[in-house]
Structures are given as structure tokens and as C-alpha cells.
Amino acid sequence: MKRIKENARYLEIRNEYDVAVVGGGVAGAAAAISAARNNAKVCLIERYCAIGGLATLGNVNVYLPLCDGKGNKIITGIAEEFMKLSILDGYGKIPECWLNNNFEECKRVRLKVEFNPWTFAIELEKLLIDEGVEILYDTRFSDVIKEGNKITHLIFEDKKGRFAIKSKVVVDASGDADVCVCAGEKVVSVDTNVACGWFFCFDGEKVKRYVFSQKYDHFNRQVYDLNTGFSIEQTTQQILSSRENISKIIEKMKNENSRILPVSLPSIPTFRMTRRLKGLIELEESHEKTLFSDAVGMFGDWRKSGPVYYMPFSALYAVRTSNLITAGRCISACSAWDIIRAIPVCALTGEIAGTASALLCRSKSKRFSSLDIRKLQQTLKNQGVKVDEKI
């Protein structure tokens, strides 16, 4: 491999924040909002140009269940607020039984909705601005600067070049544990991603959603590197494979209905799970109904009815870096990874991470591992989050 040395340079420190959130997906949005509501000065950094990640830019427009499939609503707080926000335009509706508290019917109908991705993106953006969060679009995270076990600065790149920001606390909501890697945390990766796509077409009468997912050997053999992630060639291949199949599906539909017109394709790579933190606890499916002493939230399994899980705080914060915490699909989850990547759990972990970050800014401890867990639990409960209820 040929290499060239880049000259050392000083970077402009553009601003200072209490909390910097890297990644503007659902988890990052929830983290930024909850930190701001707890009186922190917050910056949200997003490499694309809209909020919501896969839920909006990826057209994954199903807000999966807030319930356990047995009639019990177990995810509340910002996650429930976001669900209502996503359907403000009337595209989707909350099931009547949940509005009327018909418990017997709620056992049969899960609390989920479909939404218009761009309505959701716009409403999330409005909410962030209303809460005083500073948004930096078209800005890519590059690296961290640490002093001992603490991140002091984050390095980014935008159209003007490289720059730094200073922050007391950092939330990694990148979806790929990018900050964790740069901070020297242990991470885990998978190579089970597939070519897939959620897209919308107009059939001459209405806009409809279509979904496909298909494995490709030439793609699956490409392993996600722990240090660098997917190469640009691998990412491009995933995008091209996905669009090739979307094109084939659209062509087939046109043969049946010549009026078919594609109106919205995914505008980001549609990776499901890539790389995540290896924390003090790695969530397993076997942890069902395990009430951890540091439980900070509750969630169910979107794939089936029945299971209830308690979110341990120690699955979110970094091990080697005192002021780093994760949210969304890059938290520490092993066999439960497929469960926690869903929109409601991403919003839940975002609210936990943002609230904890704001509390840490005011704490004498300065380490997430030493944060007063009871104070965090009570703060979350005051915000409407179900933390440790028996089901």
C-alpha cells in the first residue's frame, strides 16, 4: 500500500458545548433533545442533510411497537412522543384500541404505525430547533482528541475543511460506533448485512411502499473492519446492489402497470447492523425479564409478542473513556442486537444517553460509570420513561 505524509496543522476550535451528539438518526435526535431539555448546551452533528437516519433517509417508515404484544405499553417518553410526531400529517394512525384503552383488543393489535418519512424528518428538525439544539449538517466525524481517559475535542470535516469542537460529554449515535473506535474502545462487528431497499412508487392513483431484502454472496463476504468500517468500495457496492434490485422490481411492476413511477428511493446506505460497543454488559436475548440494578428503561421484541427487557445503563457507556456514551444500534448488545436497532429502542436509548449526559455535566463525578444511578432513574421517570416496572 502506497502512503503519503500529510503535513501537521492547527485546527480551528469552532465552539464549545456541554454535550456533542454524533449522528442525527432517531437515537441522536432523542439524545440531543433530552440533553437540551435538561439544560445542556447541545450540538448535533449529522453527515447527511436531514434528521432521522434509516427511518427517514432510508425510507424505513414503520414505527415498530411500543408494546410487548400482550397489551402492555412499555416504551414511553420521547419514543412515544416521536411516534405521535411521525404521523402529524395523518399518513398513519395509532390503532383505535390503544386510543380507547381496550386492553383485550390491545393484546391482539400491537402499538405501531406507518409514517411519511419526510414529514417525520421535518418535524424532528423543527423539534430540535425549538429545543435550542444546534444542528451541523453535511459534517463528517473524523477523530477524537483525548487527555488521559477523557475526550476533550472532536474533529470533523465540512466544506471548509477540518475543524474541532470542544465538549464536556460525547454521545456516539453514529450507528457504527465511529466515536468508540477513535476513542480506543473495544468494539464488535458483523458481516451479515444484505442488499435491501425501502422505496415508494406512484401507481397512477396513490403512492405505495415497496420493500425487498436479498442476500448476495459477493457482498456478504466483505467483512466490516473494526478500525475503518466498510471501505468506500464496499459501501458503494451495497448501494449499487440495492438500487439494481429496486430497478428490477420497478421494471417488473411497469410491465404490469405502465403508469408506475418511482418517487422516493433510499438516499443513504441501508446497513442494518455494522459495529457496536463492547460494554460492561452485552445484552442477550436470554436477558428477558432480567431486572438489572442499573435499569434505565424497558422495551419489547418487535419480532414477536411476549418478551420484556430492561435496559442496563452499563450497556450504554464506554469502558475506557469516562465521558463517552452510546445510543441506538451501537450500544452494547450481542444476540439482542436485532431487537435494539428498532426505532422505538433507538429513541429510548437516545433519551437515556442525553439525560445522563446532561446530568454528568453537572455532576462532580465526571464519569458515566460513577453517575448517581438513582438520580438518573428518577429523572427518567419524571420524564415519563418506564424504567423498572414489573410486567
Image (cartoon, grey):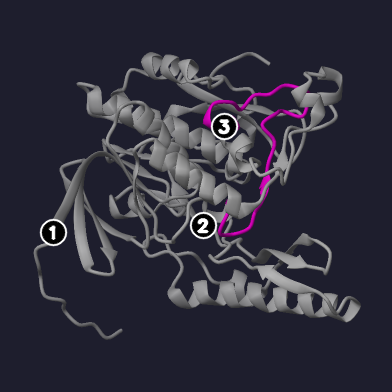
Amino acid on which disc 1 is placed? Glu
Determine the residue positioned at 65% across, 75% down.
Answer: 243
**x and y percent of residue 387 in the render?**
53, 19
The one nearer the camera, 72 or 336, is 72
Instruction: Say if mark 1 contacts mark 3, CB within 8 Å.
Output: no
Q: Residue flagged by tag 3: what amino acid is it? A: Glu
Q: Nearer the viewer, mark 3 or mark 2?
A: 3
Disc on res. 108 = none
Label 3 neighbourhood size at 10 Å, few (<14), some (14-19), many (20+)? Answer: few
Distance of label 2 from label 1 (alpha carbons) = 32 Å
What residue is shown with label 2? Answer: 274
Q: Quadrant of the N terminus?
A: bottom left
- The 10 Å Cα crowd at callout 1, few under 14, some 14 to 19, many 20 or more, is few
- In the rendered view of the protein, which quadrant contains the C terminus? top right
Q: On the image, numbered disc 3 is attached to which residue?
A: 81
Residue 183 visible:
yes
Marks 2, 1: nearer the viewer: 1
Between disc 2 and disc 1, whose residue precedes? 1
Q: Which residues are magenta?
A: 55-80
Q: Residue at x 56, y 62 (%)?
A: 191
Q: Amino acid at mark 2?
A: Thr
Residue 387 falls within the magenta-colored stretch? no
Badge 1 or badge 3: first in the primary sequence: 1
Q: CA distance from mark 1 to mark 3?
A: 37 Å
Residue nearer the viewer, 183 or 359:
359
Q: Earlier in the sequence, mark 3 or mark 2?
A: 3
The residue labelled by disc 1 is: 12
Residue 3 vs residue 356: left or right?
left
Q: Of helix, strand and loop, which one carries label 2?
A: loop
